[in-house]
Amino acid sequence: MLVHLRNPSRQITVDGPMSVVKLLKKLDLRRESVLVIRDGTLVPGDALLPDDAEVEVRPVISGG
Amino acid sequence: MKCRVCRESAVIDIRRHNANFCADHFLRYCRDQVERTMKEFSMATPGDRVLVAVSGGKDSLALWDILLELGYEADGLYIGLGIGDYSDVSGNYVRDFTSSFVANRESEHANSLIEIGLRDSYDYDVPTAADVTGRAPCSACGLSKRHLFDRAAHDGGYDVLMTGHNLDDEAAVLYGNVMRWQVDYLARQRPMLPAENGFPKKAKPLVRLSERETAAYCVLRGIDYQVEECPMAAGNRHLEYKHALAASEEASPGMKQAFYFGYLREAADLFEQSAVRTPDDGPGLVPCESCGSPTSGDPNGQPRCAFCRLSQRAAGADPVPVELLKTKRR
Ligand code: SF4
Ligand SMILES: [Zn+2]
Ligand SMILES: [Zn+2]
């Protein structure tokens, strides 16, 4: 699947299917610090992402 | 995962409340939390005119939207800080939000956006001010924003100035103030400060929502916002404190909320009673000779406020691009 990461913006591919929780573990990200977005809406942690999915992993912590 | 309210499938889980929500019930949860906070801390009552400081980020746009959803009369105030592309893009998010979520809303009030550009109105920007005065960029930026927000709220006759500080922001500030025992800051760390000495009433209605929740609110409402970080923020202390708190929150969900609300309940009054009144919030304020804002004067005893000193020094200086300032500072 195609994964968009932010700050800075970049893209990586990850083999699916994979659950959101697993994906974040693999990326070494805290679940509370990001949102996973697919087709304009949120994907919950227990959802399974198919191999052809395109998702954005958006950080929510800001330093302003 | 099922929504706590309707048992349909949930899109978000909130660990500290042990609750999952579908999109509709999550949006309702956010509005309820804000309404409850506003009541609890007497932030505003229906009929009040509210000025919301908007930056183009998730928190302030979510706040403006929630206030309008709750039926408040609320104008937005955006300050163009002149921080390169970051500011250009942020301004566009604010304008897009205004045209799609504010201007065409059915409402009895004509809510609108007020824009002030530091470069257009005062002939400086944040990077240049930081460079000319030797202040840290966030310090020059914070001083400029505070002054212009206060001024606009006062001159526009608004009942209250609201900002989008969320639970994570306030917990991180509290953590920093405790770590360094900044007792005078602790005494003023309240979600609502009443109008005083010519300064407007100020309120932070998002203190019950985490930043994950304000971001989720925007995604589910279809609000596009500035996701990138301000280039001046990298490596600041505030972020460091947030990461420290995030680690504890992960180990014990609810810790952040207990820390912040426990402080308000158990300790804030004690700090306020023992605080030394500084000239800045005491009765010894005089009007600034340039702009009329209340001030304790400059170090030579002249009645000139910190904003006028900063802006007069920075005005007209050769603009310093963001990239250059960064390399100079590291
Ligand atoms: S990070 Fe600093 S410079 Fe950037 S907007 Fe926030 S206060 Fe201003
Ligand atoms: Zn529901
Ligand atoms: Zn002044």
Image (cartoon, grey):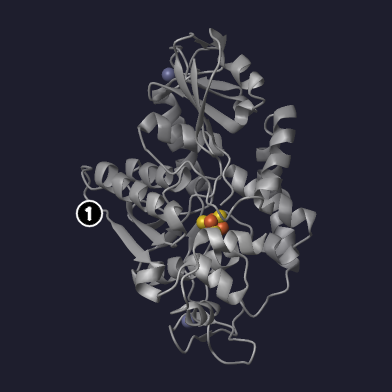
Q: Which amino acid does label 1 sit on?
A: Ala
Q: Where is residue A38 in the image (x, y as percent from the top left)?
A: 43, 21
Q: Circle 1 — which element?
A: loop
Q: Is residue B264 visible?
A: no
Closer to us: B241 or B320 = B320
- Chain under numbered label 1: B
Q: Is residue B132 visible?
A: yes
Closer to us: A6 or B202 = A6
Q: Where is residue B310 in the image (x, y as percent from the top left)?
A: 53, 78
Q: Against B55, is A47 above or below?
A: above
Residue at position x 32%, y 45% in the image: B97
Closer to us: A60 or B68 = A60
- Residue B133, picture quadrant: bottom right
Q: Position of residue B175 (x, y in %)?
A: 72, 50
Residue at position x 34%, y 49% in the image: B92
Residue at position x 54%, y 89% in the image: B303
Q: Against B102, is B310 above or below?
A: below
Within 10 Å of disc 1 (Cα), the crowding (few <14, some 14-19, many 20+) is few
Q: Against B231, is B225 above or below?
A: above
Q: Against B308, is B23 above or below?
A: above
Q: Name the residue under label 1.
A: B110
Quadrant of the picture in which ligand 2 is shown: top left
Q: How many marks?
A: 1
Residue at position x 70%, y 29% in the image: B250
Q: Is residue B151 left or right of residue B298?
A: left
